[in-house]
Amino acid sequence: MNDRRLERIIGRLLQTGVLLAAAAVAAGGTLYLVQHHSDRVDYRAFVPGSQDMRTLPGIVRSAAHFNGEALIQIGLLLLIATPVARVAMAIIGFALERDRLYTVVSLIVLLILAFSLIHFT
Amino acid sequence: MTAWEFTAVVWILSFAAGFLGALTGLGGGVVVVPALTLALGVNIKYAIGASLVSVIATSSGAAAAYVREGFSNIRIGMFLEIATTLGAIVGALLAGRIGTHALAIIFGLVLVQSAYHSFKGAPDDGHPVESDALARHLRFGGSYPVNEKRQPYGVRNVRTGFGIMFGAGALSGLLGIGSGAVKVIAMDRAMRIPFKVSTTTSNFMIGVTAAASAGIYLSRGFIDPRVAMPVMLGVLCGALLGAKVLVHAPVRTLRAVFAIVILALAIEMIVNGVMGRV
């Protein structure tokens, strides 16, 4: 394992994650539009939606019932997970390079991300 | 407006924003938020939620290419991400407490800075080859491709850069933007890293920074799937196309035009915020 190889692996990981997320969002979006295309929409007022769209268990539960909006959220969660996976990959890569300093640096970033995502969702 | 019409209009606006954002290097977020709030009357909290999501998509998509070409410095990026992710959490928590009018005014002020940055373009001053002690300790120095050869560079002022990066992260979390312009200032001006390395490393960091505030946005209900879907897909498609035509575009003229558009949006955003109409 060297820096160039690690960079290439990270590059591919980012691309795959974004494509998967976009596919899920597009599928969910199609489903949503088929079901709701002529609904009147107005987003002037901020109303935090139901828990079903704001927490991980809620989103997964609704997506299992083929809810288009929940499927979009699944895609967005995949998208959010992509940079997190990139940091995890960097930890493995730096560890394989026996670069202790940057293994620890990457680990700190992952802990901050994990704290934020777990604490708030 | 029906859901179908809204989705189509937002997709087209986002596509244009992503395209221009990629061509000018400013990112799509700075245009998407004012476009949604001013043109379509979308609440700014939904707009910044959707923008944050699109920022993760474009930065990860473009980073893949830059990282492979060997421009971005993953050590510098990783280290400074400690500052940006902490800042992003603070910013996102603040966004939940600040009123929409104040958010609009702050957004407008950041747009003014972006417009200024766009006018000035890339600085062309020399860069040090030697790193200072702390940067050497962190092994920040590297090299990047210039005309088929690799040009070595050194890094300075790590502490100042780290501090500015915390601020960049806070702005990103507060406004749902990548705040690439501030990240570039931290690396290019403060740490004296070559411009090309600064911009690509900044882009590489944007996704991780945004991911740190995304969980908070989601749980506060800022990320509405019906708004985020066309924004994310539109900006991503626009940015991918923008990256393809990047080589042939008259970038200097484009940046000047873009700067004027941003300045106009900034003024409208601030006026609307002050009058309490956003």
Image (tube, rainbow, N blue to C red):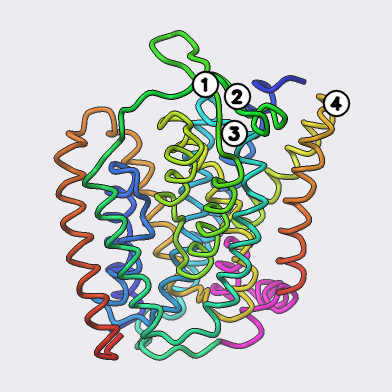
- Residue B167 location in percent, x, y? 52, 60
Q: Amino acid at mark 4?
A: Arg
Whole-Å distance between the Cαs marked 1 and 4?
A: 24 Å
CB under 8 Å between discs 3 and 2 = no
Q: Nearer the viewer, mark 2 or mark 4?
A: 2
Q: Chain of mark 3?
A: A
Q: Residues within 10 Å of mark 3 (few under 14, many from 20)?
A: many
- Residue B5 location in percent, x, y? 28, 75
Residue at 77%, 68% in the rendered image: A118
- Residue where numbered disc 3 is placed: A11
Describe the element under mark 2 as helix, strand or loop: loop
In the image, the segment drawn in magenta is: A49-76
- Residue where numbered disc 4 is placed: A98
Name the foreground residue: A104 vs B157.
B157
Q: Is the residue B27 above or below the residue B5 in the image?
A: above
- Residue where numbered disc 2 is placed: B141
Q: Chain of mark 2?
A: B
Q: Are marks 3 and 2 on the same chain?
A: no
- Residue A4 location in percent, x, y? 64, 21
Q: Is the residue A67 above or below the residue B159 in the image?
A: below
Q: Chain of mark 1?
A: B
